[in-house]
Image (cartoon, rainbow, N blue to C red):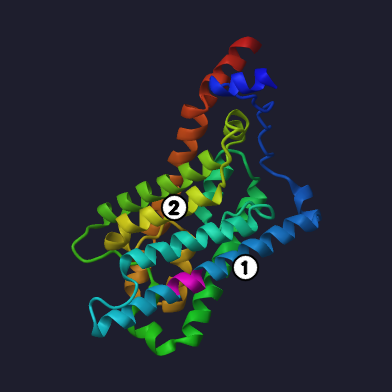
Amino acid sequence: MAKDVEGAEHGEFATKDYHDPPPTPLFDAEELTKWSFYRALIAEFIATLLFLYITVLTVIGYKSQSEADQCGGVGILGIAWAFGGMIFVLVYYTAGISGGHINPAVTFGLFLARKVSLIRAVLYIIAQCLGAICGVGLVKAFQKSYYVKFGGGANELSAGYNKGTGLGAEIIGTFVLVYTVFSATDPKRNARDSHVPVLAPLPIGFAVFIVHLATIPITGTGINPARSFGAAVIYNKDKAWDDQWIFWLGPFIGAAIAAFYHQYILRAGAIKALGSFRSNA
């Protein structure tokens, strides 16, 4: 006991054994035979539906309140809190069921890192997009007049910014989010820092919050292709569709960079692969 206390006083903590999990197979048809897989799809659908319902309703509510009073409503800060808070809550709900992706860019990044199979990635993205469409559809059904009048919560490039700026904002914003996802869920970190409990949904939600603060004035903040796609489908105006490619290409590029940076730079995946190649040569 005294030895344990002495070790703690000197900052020495026992760490958990760690084994790097093997990469997920690219194609895993066996997943299609498991109820847990379909349960995960349902969880992603419902989570994305709720995410879009609450957040788009917040955006429209703010615009309607601030129309008469510029100081009325929750403001940009409140909108950012709505997006970040919902991600925190929904990831907490669904992490143990589906992994709590709720975002095609997150799913794409995890696929590139071989954390999920191609089949799971594709069906997750479909479920997320369908959930987003249904979530925004509920908002329009409940507040149709406000929905049409105040832009339907659709992502569009703001006046005064060119498409390159919008694309760059989406790339950097999504990089911050997906990099946070990798870091917060890294099993090696959990083993090494076992004495520091990390609630993964919390930093992920904060990442969404701070990115919204930075990029709402530029693009309205996408960083989630399902969010942008669902709003565009229901709003269905030319401007939303003309800018739609920004909200797919930007997040996918940002997610790919984050996956590469975490897996091959921070986790030294490239060096490990080269060492394995040399030992086999």
Q: The disc labelled 2 sits on which kind of residue?
A: Phe
In screen coordinates, is 175 left or right of 98? left
- The verdict on residue 54 being magenta is yes
Q: Report the residue at 69% width, 44% height from top.
A: 27
Q: Nearer the viewer, residue 88 or 2?
A: 2
Residue 281 in view, yes or no? no
The disc, 2 or 1, on the residue closer to the chain's N-terminal end is 1
Q: Mark 2 or mark 1: which is in front?
A: 2
Q: Report the residue at 52% width, 67% height from top.
A: 51
The secondary structure type at the circle numbered 2 is: helix
Occupied quadrant, residue 24: top right
In screen coordinates, is 83 left or right of 43? left
Quadrant location, the N terminus: top right
Q: Position of residue 62 (x, y in %)?
A: 34, 76
Question: Which residues are drawn in magenta?
Answer: 52-56
Q: Which residue reaches farthest front?
A: 2
Residue denoted by label 2: 206
Q: Nearer the viewer, residue 203 or 250?
A: 203
Q: Residues within 10 Å of mark 1 (few under 14, many from 20)?
A: many
Marks 2 & 1, CB-CB < 8 Å contact: no
Q: Position of residue 48 (x, y in %)?
A: 56, 65
Q: Position of residue 189 (x, y in %)?
A: 57, 32
From mark 2 to mark 1, how far is it between C-alphas? 22 Å
- The verdict on residue 70 being magenta is no
Q: The disc labelled 1 sits on which kind of residue?
A: Ile
Q: Position of residue 74 (x, y in %)?
A: 34, 72
User: Which mark is drawn over residue 46?
Assistant: 1
